[in-house]
Image (spheres, rainbow, N blue to C red):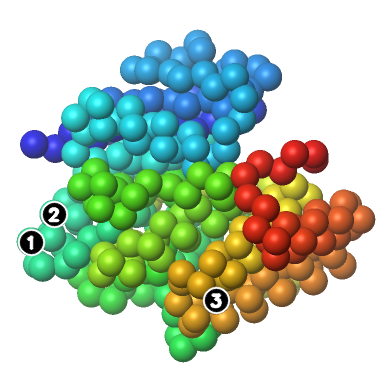
Amino acid sequence: MTHICGIIVTYEPDFNVLAKLISAITHQIDELVVIDNASKLRYVQDQKIGTQINNTTNIGLAGAQNQGINWAAKRGASHVLIFDQDSEPENDMVKKLLDSETWLLNHGYKVAAVGPVSIDKSSGVANPFYGLDHCRYKKKYVPDFEGFIEALFLISSGQLIRMDVLNLTGYMKEELFIDYIDMEWGLRAGALGYKSYGVTFAKMFHSVGENAMVIGDVRLPMHSPIRYYYMTRNALLLYFSCKYPTRWIMADIAVLTRRTIVASILYSPRGKNINNILLGIFHGIFGRAGPKLKN
């Protein structure tokens, strides 16, 4: 029997955006839990939701997701549906994801997760799914078959995952804290033969980065200095673990290099960006995981 538990992780959320997400998702799922990571303002307390868990400290995105997964497991969930606080699914997104998963399983595909097309709230442009072309990332917009795109990983928000797959692969990697969590889980599932699929006819609006710089036709997401620390550090932690495909490491090194150059030269505050990137490199090389102690 299908029983879907939604999980929303919050940290200093925008009340109006969060309320819109809760309103959009509650009628599509069986139960909802909001995990609040020690926000200074308890926005979510006034929302009429199934369950709210208030952490007294920020345990990170992965830790909060795992709290939600454990909660769902105790509720007898067959699936979890994970959301960031700034996403907004279309009214029939969950049904389309569930129907898609059923079709894929019935046709013999080993499904890790299914997820919608993510449409950037600011630009209205659909974000691609990603595969690998030799040692490079390949942006994928066009279905591989029947409206589905086989992806290397799916972004966390909007992912529909069966509990039995999570029990097989393990939950989210908490030591990453934030960033690369979805990618790492997708790679881990892929190593066991389970594939992630983007569903091109399911839609969700989502914010990528805190802001963006547009140069011609290219839109470059901008992040806070602390995010550049985590992205840099976590990338290196995964590279040096020797647990992930060499092709992926080579592809991601190219992205990491470009991100470092752009954040150091084009984005303000450049000094803080550079300091956080350098600290991320140091901690990544020497295996320092978990939360960054000082911002």
Q: Kindly identify which residue carries mark 2.
A: 102
Q: Kindly identify which residue carries mark 3.
A: 249
Q: Farthest residue to the front: give it.
A: 286
Above or below, comparing residue 15 to residue 215 in the picture: above
Residue 223 visible to the viewer = no
Above or below, comparing residue 56 to residue 201 in the picture: above
- Under mark 3, the amino acid is Ile
Q: Are marks 1 and 2 in contact (CB under 8 Å)?
A: yes
In the drawing, what numbered circle is on residue 106?
1
Q: In this view, does 276 lie to the left or right of 192?
A: right
Q: How far apart are marks 3 and 1 (CA)?
A: 33 Å
Residue 113 image offset from top left, x and y in percent: 30, 55
- Under mark 2, the amino acid is Thr
Q: In this view, does 283 lie to the left or right of 95?
A: right
Residue found 63% across the figure and 50% down from its top = 289
Question: 166 or 196: which is nearer to us?
Answer: 166
- Under mark 1, the amino acid is Asn
Q: Distance between the residues labelled 3 and 2?
A: 32 Å
Q: Label 3, secondary structure: give it.
A: helix
Dot 2: within a 10 Å radius of its alpha carbon, few (fewer than 14), some, or many (20 or more) residues? few
